Amino acid sequence: MRAPTQIKYRGHLYKLAASAKMLDMLARLKGGFSDAVLDSPAFMDYIDQDPSKIGGYIGNRGRTKEFDAALEKLLKAQGLGPNGIATWLTSGTARHMMDPPILRTTPLATFLKRAKEYTKDAAKDIAIWSHPDHGGLQDTQAVHDHLTSLFGGKK
């Protein structure tokens, strides 16, 4: 009898030869985030690449399970679902939140203060980044202004 060559984990198919390594990597990347965030298309698409290229907040060594859970709670409070949370986590904004380096030894209160500042417009950012006319950084302000004119409010 021949051994299977693939394993299905959380709806995704992985080669069995790399399954132990892949499962370890998934556990590390999940950190303190919920299964729903880990299983979201935005999170899985982001980590479905060469592991050495996973950067930003997700790949930052300063993450702790406590930081992850607190950050997910902040983003949920803005009305973001698992895919919106994952989209924000894989953004340049999330990457910059960890500059200057937030270390694993950083007090949670210090991390939360910084996270609140960086996530205050997360829902608006996701709407802009997901807009069909948004093609990159050069479009962010134009799409922001367009959405603001449609829905009212300050530019």
Image (spheres, rainbow, N blue to C red):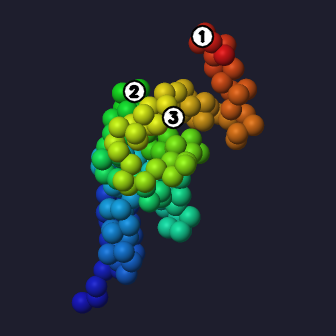
Residue lying at the far top in this picture: please name it. 152
Q: Amino acid at mark 1?
A: Gly
Q: Residue at x 38, y 55 (%)?
A: 104
User: Does dot 1 land on a helix, a strand or a loop?
Assistant: loop
For residue 96, what is the image quadrant?
Answer: top right
Upstream in the sequence, badge 3 or badge 2? 2
> Which residue is label 3 attached to?
118
Q: Nearer the viewer, residue 101 or 151?
A: 101
Q: Is residue 92 above or below residue 84?
A: below
Cβ–Cβ under 8 Å for marks 1 and 3: no
Q: Residue at x 34, y 42 (%)?
A: 108
Classify residue 149 as left or right of residue 62.
right
Q: Callout 2: 10 Å neighbours few (<14), some, many (20+)? A: few
Name the spot of residue 113 as percent of width and height, x first: 42, 34
Q: Residue at x 60, y 30 (%)?
A: 128
Q: Amino acid at mark 2?
A: Gly
User: Does dot 3 land on a helix, a strand or a loop?
Assistant: helix
Name the quarter where the C terminus is drawn: top right
> Which residue is label 2 attached to?
79
> Which residue is label 1 attached to?
153
Upstream in the sequence, badge 1 or badge 2? 2
Name the quarter where the N terminus is drawn: bottom left
Residue 91 visible to an observer of this rendering = no
In this view, the mark in front (1 or 3): 3
